[in-house]
Image: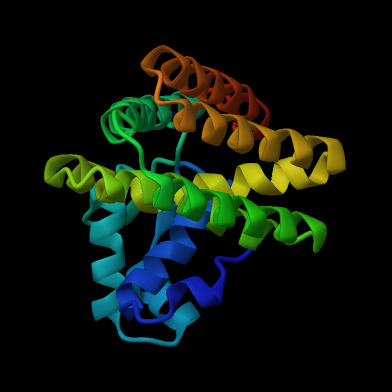
Amino acid sequence: MQYPTSWLQGVSLGESISSELRLQIINGTIKPGEILSENRIASDFGTSRSPVREAMKTLSNEGLIRLERMGAVVLGLSLKDVEELYDVRYLIESFVQSHVFAEPHPDLLRNLQQIIDRMELAAKHHDPVEFSFQDLAFHERIIMEARHKRILHLWKSIRPIVITVMLITTEQVFSGGDNKIKYVLDKHIKLLQEMGSLEPARIQAAVDHYFEDSRTTLHHSFPKG
C-alpha cells in the first residue's frame, strides 16, 4: 500500500515524505524499534535532508517516532493508540453533530448524500482509496459546518493519522467482500437519516453505534499493544 499521490498535490515535500512514512509506520511496514536515518530517507526520496527533517519533526509531534542523536526511533501506533484516537474523534463528532443539527440544514444533508453516492460509486469500482477519501469528506464536512475554531484546530491535529488509519481499515473492509462494504455504506446512510431527524437522542444513538462498530473494525486491523 502506498499513499495516494493525488492526495499529495500542493503539499510540501516534507509533508509528502511524512505522509508516506506515516503510512509505512502505521501499517507495520516500518516496525517499532527501527531506527530511521535522515541520510537514508533523503536518498530513498531523492531529496536533501531539509524536507526529511521537516517530516521527522511532524512524525515526532504525532508520537510515531522519538528523535534521538543517532536517528529517529520508531514507536509505531498500537491498538490502544488508535482506540484513543477514535475516542477523540467520538468527542469531536458527537459534539459537532448535536451542535450542527440542532436546526435544519437541508443543503448540508444534500451534500452529505452526494458524498455517500460517491462512496457507492467507489465501492462499485472497487476503489478503497477513493472510498476512504469520501469517507473522510463525509465526517469532515460536518465538522467544518460547526464553524467552531477550537474544534477545527483539534481536528486538524489528528487528521493526518485519521486518514491513514482510514486507508488501512478500508483496505481491510474491501478485502472482506461486498457485504462488508455495504455494511459500512449503510452505517453512513443511517447516520445521515438520524441527523435529518433533528432529534438529539436519535442523533447521539447513531453516533454511539457508528463508533462502537468502528472500534470492532479497528480490532481486526491493528495489533494489540
Looking at this rendering, what residue extends furthest in the left direction? 149
Classify the position of the N terminus by image quarter: bottom right
Q: As drawn, is 158 to the left or to the right of 177?
A: left
Residue 7 spot, x, y in % from top left: 48, 71
Q: As drawn, is 37 to the left or to the right of 170?
A: left
**Near-viewer residue (96 or 156):** 96
Q: As drawn, is 117 to the left or to the right of 180?
A: left
Residue 110 spot, x, y in % from top left: 50, 52
**Near-viewer residue (23 or 214):** 214
**Near-viewer residue (43 or 90):** 90
Residue 167 spot, x, y in % from top left: 58, 51
**Near-viewer residue (60 or 165):** 165
Question: Residue at the location (61% across, 47% down)?
Answer: 168
The quadrant holding residue 96 is: top left
Question: Residue at the location (25% across, 48% down)?
Answer: 157
Residue 64 can be seen, yes or no:
no
In the displayed structure, 48 sits above or below 197; it is: below
The quadrant holding residue 46 is: bottom left
Q: As drawn, is 123 to the left or to the right of 169?
A: right
Looking at the picture, the colour scheme in use is rainbow
**Count of all numbered marks drawn on residues in the image:** 0
Residue 57 spot, x, y in % from top left: 23, 59
Residue 87 can be seen, yes or no:
yes
In the displayed structure, 225 sits above or below 186; it is: above
Question: Residue at the location (32% across, 44% down)?
Answer: 143
